Image (tube, coloured by chain):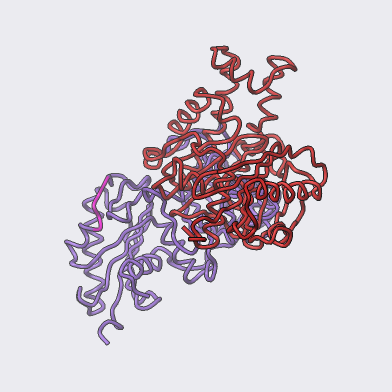
Chain colours: A purple, B red
Amino acid sequence: MAKKTKFIIGIDVGGTNTKIGLIKGHTIKSKLVLKTKQYFRKKDLLGAIIKETQNLLKKNGLSKNDILGIGIGLPGAIDYKRGIVHYLPNIPGWKDVYLARLMQQRCGIPTYIDNDVNLMALAELHYGHGKGKTNIVCITLGTGVGGGLILEGRLYRGTDFAAGELGHIPVAIEGPSCSCGGKGCLESFIANTRILKRAKQIFGPDITLEKLSSLANRGNSKAIKIWQEVGNFLGAALAGVVNLLNPQVIIIGGGVAGSGEILFNQVKKTIKERAMLIPKKEVRIKKAKVEEPGIIGAGILVRGSLKLK
Amino acid sequence: MAKKTKFIIGIDVGGTNTKIGLIKGHTIKSKLVLKTKQYFRKKDLLGAIIKETQNLLKKNGLSKNDILGIGIGLPGAIDYKRGIVHYLPNIPGWKDVYLARLMQQRCGIPTYIDNDVNLMALAELHYGHGKGKTNIVCITLGTGVGGGLILEGRLYRGTDFAAGELGHIPVAIEGPSCSCGGKGCLESFIANTRILKRAKQIFGPDITLEKLSSLANRGNSKAIKIWQEVGNFLGAALAGVVNLLNPQVIIIGGGVAGSGEILFNQVKKTIKERAMLIPKKEVRIKKAKVEEPGIIGAGILVRGSLKLK
């Protein structure tokens, strides 16, 4: 009986918010949100995560013995097997941090970590548009462009757990320099900052992505054109992924994915125009379905790592 | 005892040559070569393959009962599971041919078919640069640019067995139209015909790819530049694949791969410049090692399909 009532802690570390959730079964029972940017140093953010995790337990009348494990998703290069955060492009100060070991020592609870889009892919596989599918490509649009791959029904992490970097597929061989060191990568065209830069050239300094979306949805042709350009870059890169991996579904998440149908319709149109006959017939393009995919995916990671269902 | 002495027929259908090999264990005991272009119609090529397969058996004093199975690799879109050739871009007249069933009926031997670069990937996994590796990207350069993926130690075929089309990753979003219907695909820059077209603009109509290679190897700077351009396109596309799949090794085969170190060095340089830190540290770039990979791979396909070792 005791086993059945056990909980999992799922933590989603993001550039803006860090969310800590208490999971029972497949649902989030309780949640805390930290403002990531309030904690300048790695040590401070880590301290806050540990403190708030313990607060969440206390608040719910639980002790560490009630927790099966902690799962943490982070936006960067993560060694899942050894529990190391190699680096986080949008959160400074994290370099080769043995986070799983550290959390385990400090909280006394087994801890597993992974890339946040990998966890989103697990969440969509179990509870979202990936349910019942075996070959799934997940992509998130935001400050960075991240990716996660489910191949043959399992999370594909690659040789050094570095696979899935959809944002760093070159779409223009002589394109602008990318933060990754490459050139003309998808991210260098459609990261939030790049879209905003383009929007400011047309609408002035006060434009935001939310305003740009609402302008487009109200029929502003210049705003529509910007989102169509974004969709065309994204669609071209995804056409290559469709030809390479022949997935059943591509699931798009992250902030920019909320910009509405204009972006999605363009992505679908470009894939239809560019991808090969057989793989494009199969593939569906979907907006991410699972809420709090980072927390939910972290729960699946813990259950999978502990070989529980 | 009887089982141990059984043979496999491996057939490699190519745009120029079609090779039929008699395999025992891991080696080719006997081989026949047909000129594919001599057979204008699908029916004629198919008839010749069947006739020469039977000739090969007769020549070696064997009957169909000595043969475990026939494996066939073809350059195009193949449904491995149902044994259908959907189409072959460089061999006209093949559309949705139930080849496995047809061969089985005509020869009385179980037959399995697959894409030829998938078979090359199996050959390299078992006997080449992929030995002991789990994540391998294979690419062939020639009339078309083909690909095959070994992921987590197994051939990754994708949802409709259409995965691995490395030639149809866009590298220039506004590039030239590609034979696949896409735009700016890798193949549209580095297919044999495109390299030759570029070479003819500089060296006149009599240049061949062999001559272009030998000019480059003797230090002709214009010829070197052409191969470097090819290597740069190939390297840029492969940098994206390195970021997406984080493979241990990329194995390059096909005609153009014989053009020498200039191409390979440029590919390595471009990947080093463009790919991300962690996955580029791991990946090795190798020239294909297995001779007659189509025949050898077809043998592995048959053994795998019959669940033999």
- B41 to the left or right of A145: right
Q: Is residue A143 above or below residue B159?
A: above
Residue B41: x %, y % from top left: 82, 46
- B76 to the left or right of A125: right
Residue nearest the observer in this picture, B5 or A1: B5
Residue nearest the observer in this picture, B141 or A196: B141
Residue nearest the observer in this picture, B278 or A90: B278
Please name the residue shown 32% across and 46% down the image: A87
| Residue A66 among magenta residues | no
Q: Quarter of the image containing the N terminus of chain A?
A: bottom left
Residue A95 seen in render: yes
Please name the residue shown 73% across and 37% down the image: B35
| Residue A99 among magenta residues | yes
Range of residues picked out in magenta: A96-100
- B123 to the left or right of A26: right
Q: Residue furthest bottom?
A: A1
Q: Quadrant of residue A93?
A: top left
Residue A25: x %, y % from top left: 37, 78
Residue A188: x %, y % from top left: 51, 40
